Amino acid sequence: MLKKRVAASLVVKDGIVVQSIGFKKYLPVGKPTIAIEFLNKWGIDEIILVDISATKNHQEPDFLMIKNAALKCHVPLTIGGGIKTIDQIRELMHCGADKISLNQSALLNRKLISGAANVFGDQCVVISIDALKTDKGYQVFDYVNQKALDLSIVEFTKEVQDLGAGEILINSVNRDGSYLGYDLDLIDSVCEVANVPVICCGGAKNANDFIKVFNETNVSAACAANFFHFTEHSVNITKSIIKRNLDIRLETFADYNDSEYDGQLRLNKKTEEVLENMLFIRIEKEVI
Amino acid sequence: MSLKKNIVIIDYGVGNTYSVSNAIKYLGYNKLVISDDENVIKNADVLILPGVGAFEEAANNLRSRSLDVILNEEVLNKKKPILGICVGMQLMATLSEENGIHYGLNWIEGRVKKLQLPKEFAIPHVGWNDVSINHVEPLFSRNSKDSNFYFDHSYYLDCDSNYVSAYCDYHIKVTAAVQKENIFGVQFHPEKSQTNGLKLFRDFFNSIK
């Protein structure tokens, strides 16, 4: 059976992974290479790296940064930010990208969507849409100019899908960095009209938010950024809780299957007896 | 196969060549190059035909670089082992129905068809899916029976079940892996399937004398 995906998004600004809050405030986290290496070790299903400074600064994608970041990434890597031409996409595929994500250029140049789909196949083209809740409903948010456009999320989703989008990445501007959980109404409205897989992003606080969005909407994948960065084994711990409810992939050696959690889904300390026994467990490194 | 064999990843303009190269190098195979040069391909001990692309573009690129002629010689006559990935596997078929009829290398008789599924099955088929294995040897000997791999495709290869070494279930039985003598193909992306994918690469290279 096809499994729901737990994805991580890395927001990169001027070569540094940042924590993004409300698409306005950015706090530094660290180097993309290190973040990818660890997310990969902890068994993430997919990584989406978005360079938010490239388009704003009128720059090309940072090919060297991406090449270095991709080196230890053995899960699918989607790259976004600063992409304007087919040649840049080709170059990205030579730098370790497996899919590309278009946001601003999908708004400004619809032809790039169909062009990319014709060359690389629709499965390679992810369209990233930022949604802002307004009086008129959910509208497309232009992050470069920091304003909502007169374009509804549902209309835009249908349009890009017809042009050849292979996946829709829907980001909630209101929930970004808020830890308030995913915006289920927004996600539902997109899933309703999408025939392609939908990835949701914005607001995840812990495993319960993933379980909720997987159970209550048709999303194929749910994405989190901030909360994966700040605790050791954040991915496998989160996945171990989700897996108690849903069929997802959990194959890391540390699978936390026998762990217990408190009401905030923080790990409980194991009993002294268990800890004592753990001292004598020998862990063989898996040789492939 | 020793770590010293020459591995060539065929560069035909649309593959995620660097991802494939990263995964294989991670296993210690350092004599690995990404190339479309005839002499380099002739010197190879084993070939990889990667793929992220639309069939038409991929097939046209192969032909415009004369790679179809070179590969026919190396694979059909010299019997060099080759592994096709995703559209790289689909190119081994007779033809594809993606955006009109386009002809492939015809190494494995079969058609590449669009996935046509009920609405609740999103297309493309993206994500980690379990495979059912018909032929464990050689590609799946290190993997367990219910291993999962990362898929990302809208079209699938419909061919004689004798050639199908593994399939996955996405409302219909989707061909996940094929083999015919020295020709191997996988619909999923072993380079992006973490440990399970790396095990598959190791099995493939180890099966080569």
Image (spheres, helix red, strand yellow):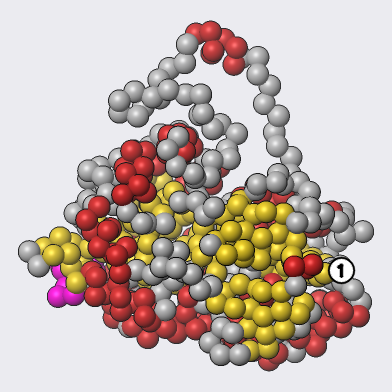
What is the quadrant of residue A165 in the picture? bottom left
- Residue drawn 42% across the image and 22% down it: A260
* Image: magenta residue range: A142-151
Residue that carries the numbered disc 1 in the rendered image:
B181
Q: Chain of mark 1?
A: B
Nearer the observer, B173 or A284: B173
Q: Is residue A68 above or below residue B71?
A: above
Residue A166 % position (x, y): 44, 71
Percent x, y of residue B46: 82, 67
At x 32%, y 44%, the residue is A212
Front residue (pair B100, B33): B100
Q: Is A38 located above or below residue B57 in the figure?
A: above
Determine whether A36 is above or below A79 in the image.
above
What is the quadrant of the C terminus of chain A in the image?
top right
Where residue A176 sits in the image (x, y, percent)?
Answer: 25, 51
Q: What secondary structure is the magenta-colored segment mainly? A: strand
